[in-house]
Amino acid sequence: MSDVLELVDVSVVRDGRALVEDVSWSVKEGERWAILGPNGAGKTTLLNVASSYLFPSSGTARILGDQLGKVDVFDLRPRIGMAGIAMAEKLPKRQTVLQTVLTAAYGMTATWHENYDAVDEDRARAFLDRLGMTEYLDRSFGTLSEGERKRTLIARAMMTDPELLLLDEPAAGLDLGGREDLVRRLGRLARDAYAPSMIMVTHHVEEIPPGFTHVLMIRQGKVLAAGPVEMELTSRNLSHCFGLPLVVERVGDRYTAQGLPLS
Ligand SMILES: Nc1ncnc2c1ncn2[C@@H]1O[C@H](COP(=O)(O)OP(=O)(O)OP(=O)(O)O)[C@@H](O)[C@H]1O
Ligand SMILES: [Mg+2]
């Protein structure tokens, strides 16, 4: 299997501080990774490197076989799907849900043309349907609830048929039903052999969809653990990562974590 992402000794330094420090990490084709870590640990920074929007200050980053700095990022970006808060803010609020997803086919955040291909429109409808958004096609993006917006962004990220799909806290802000619905849909995607390689940032082990294969834990910019979920998602690693005693349990094909009672 080839590497979808290969970081070697990657550091990102801003104002003399390493936001991400000496990270070596590789993601192989077909793997589905969850990134866990406290606020400010460097998770979004890592995703920004993986999406080619941020270049490492030192070390090398290869994305889909091409090294950052030696490849035209405009060739690379359509091959990567990214759904996160930063993207949501760039999208025009008045565009309909269907338009919001369709514009991704042309690598744009705005500018609605009337002459999109029928093929693209069919694809956009299919992705939205897969995420349970068929009833909202004509709603303006700005009027959507948090959960509806997240699902639209994932459909949008799928539109370019990416080889790598990056999700930054897709379940944040969702109610319990919304979270469970999204986790189930992401689980279905994770188990689809034709779906892209996936990397998802989350704060909660409860949000790791079934079918996710690997976990990376990061704290203060440094990787603490990286490997198969069943090996690395341990109470010991999670406690170390979040800096408090935690117990992780597997419940069916999902996980839960809680702090130990104070004695
Ligand atoms: N451009 C920048 N200049 C200086 N510091 C930055 C910059 N971007 C991010 N940081 C800092 O880098 C650290 C890591 O940020 P990052 O957004 O990667 O964290 P995160 O793990 O995604 O956190 P959260 O869980 O809160 O989203 C934070 O302390 C943040 O304040
Ligand atoms: Mg973040």
Image (spheres, grey):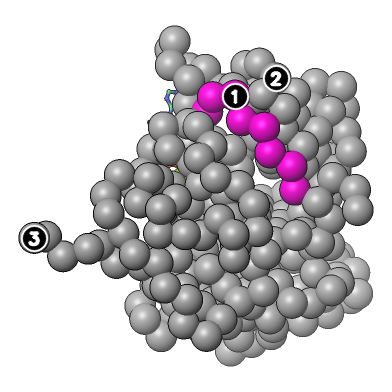
In terms of image quarters, where does ligand 1 lie? top left
Residue at mark 1 to residue at mark 2: CA–CA distance: 8 Å
Among the two numbered marks 2 and 3 on one chain, the one whose residue lies closer to the N terminus:
2
Residue at mark 2 to residue at mark 3: CA–CA distance: 45 Å
Residue at point 47%, 59% (across, down): 234
**Residue that numbered label 1 is attached to:** 22
Q: Are marks 1 and 2 in contact (CB under 8 Å)?
A: yes
Mark 1 within 8 Å of ligand 1, using the beta carbon: no
Between residue 49 and residue 1, name the one nearer to us. Answer: 1
Could you tell me residue 184's position as x and y percent?
A: 57, 82
**Residue that numbered label 3 is attached to:** 263
Q: Nearer the viewer, mark 2 or mark 3?
A: 3
Magenta span includes 210: no
Residue at point 54%, 24% (across, down): 21
Residue type indicated by callout 3: Ser
Describe the element under mark 1 as helix, strand or loop: strand
Q: Is residue 249 left or right of residue 73?
A: left
**Residue that numbered label 2 is attached to:** 59
Q: To which quarter of the image does residue 41 belong?
A: top left
Q: Residue furthest bottom?
A: 135
Among the two numbered marks 1 and 2 on one chain, the one whose residue lies closer to the N terminus:
1
- Residues in magenta, as a range: 20-27
Could you tell me residue 149's position as x and y percent?
A: 51, 68
